[in-house]
Image (spheres, grey):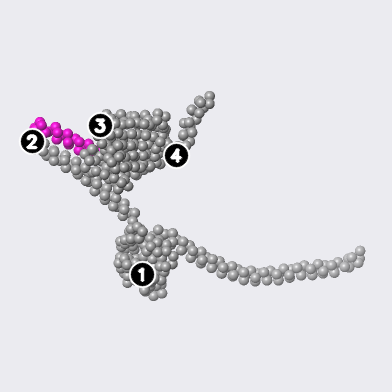
Amino acid sequence: MLLALLNLPALFLIVAALVSGLFVGWYVGWRLAKRGLTRSNEQIGNSRANDASSLSSHLLNATLNEMREGLLVIDRDMRVLTANRAAQQLVFNLGGDGIFSRRLTELTRNPAIYDAFLDGIRGTERSGVKVETYGPERRVFDLRVVPLRSAADGGISGALGIFFDVTRLERLELVRQEFLSNVSHELRTPLTSIIALTETLEDGALADSQNNRRFLSIIKKNSTRMHRLIDDILELSAIEAGNVKVSREWVPLRLLVEDIVGSLSAGTSRNVSLDNQIPSNAKVFADPHRLAQMLTNLIDNAVKFNRDGGKVTIRYETHNSDHILVEDTGEGIPAHHLDRLFERFYRVDRARSRDLGGTGLGLAIVKHLAKAHGGEVSVESRFGEGTVFTIELPRHIEEAHREESPSKLTAAG
């Protein structure tokens, strides 16, 4: 026991030495680790800076290349410094890196582009420069060029140009102008007739019992034509603007066609027979009012433009979608007219169409109503033999199963 007590200080010294050794070892290791960590942080910092620079470069390139607008930068010698993908492909019809370091005159002979960038080099900003290019297709650009100034001395070091693709806007403007021109023409013709006959009646023809009623009949006819034209314009505008809602339901097709055929037969003096070959159980998933509007237009046209003693047949076929066919035995439509047949105011025979009371908007309305149903309308024609218009409507699978299930249950019972 005494020996053990005498050995306590020695044991304490040993433990203290061990603790001191552990502390010193930890301290030295911590210092070395800190020094190594500092160097590692410097390396990591440099690596992160390089990564950030690389990321910024990739982000900038991606942003420029995904722009719809073409971007082109040139130096004072009119050589290309950089260009995004849109400029290479849309404006200059080039790919890869073949555009860089080349003179602008090597890339294009378009004087509008050259003059705009030359003004930029001289310190003048240009905007609203119309540029037309003729590659695989004609394109129109609105070009803006600004000078680039050096940050050191403020001198001009190059020029930057942005090409805004306005091809679609120009096409829409042409369509608008054509539409206004057609509307003005379509309204001017009946208005001229109404004004002339009104003046004739005012000058004394009102007392002419042989002609006054005929004049009034012509005035009424032209007034009705103008009213129908305005109605069609408003209807087409509403459909194109998406303001017409299509409320689809299962429509008994044969009954709908019978009503249309009966109405048109009573209102025409043409010697044309109408044959409804729609099966009695045929149903289509559509808006009944809009479907009647489409079929009335197509069947009415088939009657009007048919030959004397001709025939109009309405048929139904079902594949992956429902097809409603309106076939006539008329003179047919020349092939070069078929692609434009559904355009607004487009007519194969303008004089005959006006005489028959057409506005030139009926087929355009049919096309947009078919699209509103998620379907299409198409035409096939052989000149001298006849024409077939087809309305294609998608089937509603869930509703089709619901319609079929009661009959299956009845048969099973």
Task: Single out the mark in the foreground, 1 or 4.
Answer: 4
Query: Residue at label 4?
Result: 320
State the residue position of label 1: 106
Relative to the observer, which residue lies in front, 183 or 110? 110
Frontmost of labels 3 and 2 is 3
Q: Which residues are magenta?
A: 206-228
**Type of residue at label 2?**
Gly
Residue ranking furthest to the front: 384
**Which residue is identified by label 2?**
204
Q: Quadrant of residue 23?
A: bottom right
Q: Earlier in the sequence, mark 3 or mark 2?
A: 2
Are the residues at dot 1 and dot 3 in contact (C-beta closer than 8 Å)?
Answer: no
Q: Is residue 347 left or right of residue 248?
A: left
Membership of 207 in magenta stretch: yes
Mark 1 lies on a secondary structure that is helix
Q: Position of residue 141 (x, y in %)?
A: 33, 60
Q: Which residue is mark 3?
A: 271
| Pointer 1 with pointer 4, Cβ within 8 A | no
Q: Earlier in the sequence, mark 1 or mark 4?
A: 1
Q: Are marks 3 and 4 in contact (CB under 8 Å)?
A: no
Callout 4 amino acid: Asn
Categorize mark 1 by other alpha carbons within 10 Å: few (<14), some (14-19), many (20+). few
